Image (cartoon, coloured by chain):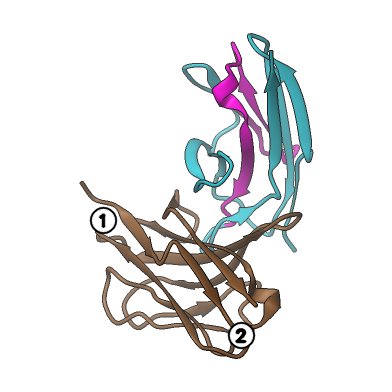
Chain colours: A brown, B cyan
Amino acid sequence: DAEITQSPRHKITETGRQVTLACHQTWNHNNMFWYRQDLGHGLRLIHYSYGVHDTNKGEVSDGYSVSRSNTEDLPLTLESAASSQTSVYFCASSPRGGSDTQYFGPGTRLTVL
Amino acid sequence: GQNIDQPTEMTATEGAIVQINCTYQTSGFNGLFWYQQHAGEAPTFLSYNVLDGLEEKGRFSSFLSRSKGYSYLLLKELQMKDSASYLCAVGPGNTPLVFGKGTRLSVIA
């Protein structure tokens, strides 16, 4: 069955370290998204991609980067982790335009100490 | 700008009906979505409205009024497993979905 996976599911790191969160989908969706979810803020868009080699900044992109080298993967990199980046991160994908139904991965809980 | 408002918390009794409201102001409109999110899990798609009116799907129904910038999610015959957060999201058009902060619903016996 087609699916969207994230790894790792849990990660503890130290301030200043580079961290990469993986997202992989087998639906062959063109559109992929990264969100963070924090109490009181809901889901906030970090970066998104509408296809290979396409990347766009979202609402809270500072301190994060993404690259899209194939259809299946959109890794999220924290260049120098900060305690403010402690959060739950969700990856999502959608088959059609930007405002199409999104399907979410299981999430990664990241703690920055 | 984009703004989506929904109540923070609601409590309802098992077997009852509950209505979760959502109002929105967005720069464009290409549909309104409702997602369910159980604690510690990912959001899952519930419903989509692009035209005015009521869409029914089993115990869940969703209503949209585009002229009023208003939607609601109606849950009937509440069950304990319906305790979750319900997220309202709007598709502005060519840009990604904009999500509200969610309504946490507690179903009590």
Q: Amino acid at mark 1?
A: Trp
Camera-side mark, 1 or 2: 2
Q: Earlier in the sequence, mark 1 or mark 2?
A: 1
In the rendered view, tell whether residue B70 sits above or below residue A102.
above
Query: Alpha-carbon distance for marks 1 and 2?
Result: 29 Å
Q: Find disc 2 in the rendering and name its residue.
A: A63
Q: Secondary structure at mark 1?
A: loop
Q: Residue extending furthest left?
A: A1
Disc 1 sits on a residue from what chain?
A
Residue A85, x across and y down, in percent: 64, 74
Residue B44, x across and y down, in percent: 47, 42
Q: Quadrant of the C terminus of chain A?
A: bottom right
Q: Secondary structure at mark 2?
A: loop
Q: Residue at x 72, y 55 (%)?
A: A39
Q: Residue at x 40, y 83 (%)?
A: A67
Q: Amino acid at mark 2?
A: Gly
* Residues marked 1 and 2, same chain: yes
Q: Find disc 1 in the rendering and name its residue.
A: A27
Say whether residue A50 is left or right of residue A28: right
Q: Residue at x 54, y 50 (%)?
A: B30
Say whether residue A8 is left or right of residue A58: left
Disc 2 sits on a residue from what chain?
A
In this orientation, which residue lies closer to the viewer: B62 or B77? B77
Q: Is residue B104 magenta?
A: no
Q: Is residue B54 visible?
A: no
Q: Which residues are magenta?
A: B63-92
In which quarter of the view is residue B63 placed? top right
